[in-house]
Each structure stands twice: as C-alpha cells, then as structure tokens.
Amino acid sequence: MTAFVAEYGLFLAKVITLIAGILLLVGGIGALLERRREHREGHIEVKSLNDHLEDMKTDIEAAVVDEVLAKQHEKSRRKQEKADAKALKKTLKQGKEPEKPRKRVFVLNFDGDIHASGVEALREEVTAVLTIADKDDEVVVRLESPGGLVHAYGLASSQLERIKNKGIRLTICVDRVAASGGYMMACIADHLVAAPFALVGSIGVVAQLPNFHRLLQKHDVDYEVLTAGEYKRTLTVFGENTDKGREKFIEELEDTHDLFKTFVAEYRPRLNVEKVATGEVWFGRRALDEQLIDAISTSDDYLFELCSEHDVFELHYEVKVGLQERLGQLAVNTSDNLLLRWWQRVMNSRMLSR
C-alpha cells in the first residue's frame, strides 16, 4: 500500500509538472503573439467594382447568350480597350492634355460593434484615400452600427470628418441600421442614403447598471468605495448609491445628450433636432420624412449606378490574424450579433406597436 501511494504521488507530481510546463509554454506563446500583434502592420487591398460587375456580366452572358455572340462581345471589348490605350499614348506623345479622367469613387465599409472596434481599420483606410483623392472624387461609406460607447464612436466620427475637411464629397449608405453612435457617424455625410426599412436615429444616451448593495447587506458583507474628489464615483455596482450621486450621473447623461444633439444639428441644419432627439428610431421611409436622411436606396443600387459613369474602387485594410485571435474575434462577433438581433427585435416590436 505504501509503495502504491508513493508511486501515485510520483505520478501526480509528474502530471502537475507537465501541466505547469504546458501553461508556461502557452503563456509564453501568448505573450509573444501579443508583442507581435502590437508591432505588426497591415496593408490596403483594392478591388475595382467596375471590373467585378464586368466579370459578372461576362459570366452570365457565357451561360445565357449564344457562345459565338459572347465571344464577339468579348473581342469587341478588348479591341476597344486597346484602341483607348493607343489613343491615350498618342495624345501624350503629341504633348497634348489627355481627356479628363472619369470621376473616382472610393468605397469603405464600417461594421460597428459596441466598442466601434472597426475604427482601427477605418483610420487606415481614410488615410489611404486621402493620399490620392481630390475634390473631384467621392467617398462612399457603407455603414452598419446599432451604436455603442460615446468616446469610441466619437473617434469613428472624427475619421469621417477628415474626409469632409479635405473638401471631398462623402456619401454614407445604410442598409440595415445606423442608430445612436451609428447615426453620429452617418449624419456627417454630404449625402445620406438608407434602405426602405433600415433603422435610423436613436439620438439619445443610455446607461444602466445593477446594484448589489442590499444583497451584500443581507449577508453582512461590507463594500467600501474610497474616492478623492466629490464626483470621482457617482453610482457603483456594490456600494450604496445616493440621491446626490444619481442627480450628478443624470446631469452627465444630459450633458452628453446635448453634445450629441449639437453635433447632429451642425451637420444636418435642416433637421428639427428637438423633435427627433428622443431616443426613437425610424424606418428608412419615415426617416426621410423627418429629414434624418436624404434619399431611399440600397447601397447596391447606389454603387451600381455610379459604376456606369465612374471608376469605383473598394478599399479594405487587411491585417493577418492568427488562429488565437480569429477564435477570440469569432466569440466577440457572435456575442455582438446576438446583441444586435435582440436589439433589432426590440426596436421592431416598438415600431409595430406604435
């Protein structure tokens, strides 16, 4: 029996040592990945939407049009491209000014979560656009966001302001939702477009937190909050909240709301801000009536029309992501999607009950 206990103890020690070693190894790898993540760089990927549409058209023609006609069409297209290139080369050789190029449109995508984490990519994309775009060009942002933290969406809005400050036309398209912080970004647009049933608005501020003070008291647990500064902490989760603290907290919410309303009024002066800054949301068609948006359209239709007369490029800032980060981001995206779906159900039920 003694020998068995000794052997078991030795085996257990080996197992514990092995587990500790694995944990140290994983921790070291995690720290290394974190350091690499801090110093890694991404790159801008560019896709021509004109070429994308042309490829789609070619594929469909190959399937539904007579093969001979499809080949003739493709041959004619290539012949025209060569002729255009030859004409441009001749013009430059003669020292003449070439014909004014077609207007360029740069398309960015912003899919916002509660932390507006997409702002890191957005700032790189905006910087890339500003290195080449001029006042004859246009930037289109396909925006989706139910809102989130004020300071996070304030930074995201500032990135869009950079485009405006350069005098470049900014169009924002909303296909599903641009509410609260999402609308803070959307209202900056020179031209704001939303799908017929996109949710727009929610110009308001909300804060909520549970309080377990009475539960702790019931179990004779003391929780102390020590501060230096009268309003360093107004409401707490575990401490006893006071009427004075609540009043100060509400005062801060109202101040934030006033800043939000002033911001919206600055970019949409025709909007009756006091009427719509109630925290309510509107579907696209109703939002147009309230002048929260400028036109009804999906981003697909808007960009499709632009492609007929302009050169349209979609930009995306790409960073190589490791397996650990992909799994973590998958968990975050899943929780955000569940929250968004719940929020949309709540908003839809509110709108239908009106």
Image: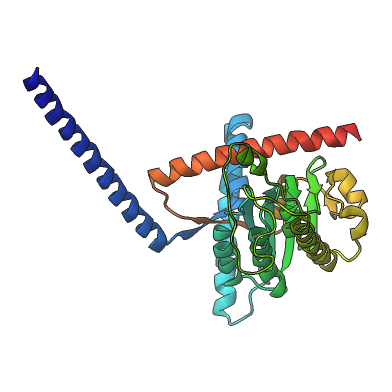
| Outermost residue toward the front in this view | 220
- Residue 69 visible, this orientation: no
Judging depth in this view, the residue of 59 and 20 nearest the camera is 20
> Which residue occupies 79% across, 58% down?
247
| Outermost residue toward the left in this view | 3
- Judged left or right of residue 119, residue 100 is right
Q: Is residue 123 above or below residue 69?
A: below
Q: Which of the 4 image quarters holds residue 26?
A: top left
Judging depth in this view, the residue of 203 and 218 nearest the camera is 218
Q: Which of the 4 image quarters holds residue 124?
A: bottom right
Q: Is residue 345 above or below residue 184?
A: above
Q: Is residue 314 above or below residue 265?
A: above
Q: Quadrant of the C terminus?
A: top right
> Which residue occupies 65% across, 61% down?
151
- Judged left or right of residue 277, residue 171 is left
Q: Quadrant of the N terminus?
A: top left
Q: Which of the 4 image quarters holds residue 15?
A: top left
> Which residue occupies 72% across, 50% down?
207
What is the x, y in percent for residue 39? Answer: 39, 63
> Which residue occupies 58% across, 37% down?
219
Judging depth in this view, the residue of 308 and 217 nearest the camera is 217
- Judged left or right of residue 94, residue 41 is left
What is the x, y in percent for residue 179? Answer: 76, 49
- Judged left or right of residue 283, residue 71 is left
What is the x, y in percent for residue 92? Answer: 57, 77
| Outermost residue toward the bottom in this view | 95
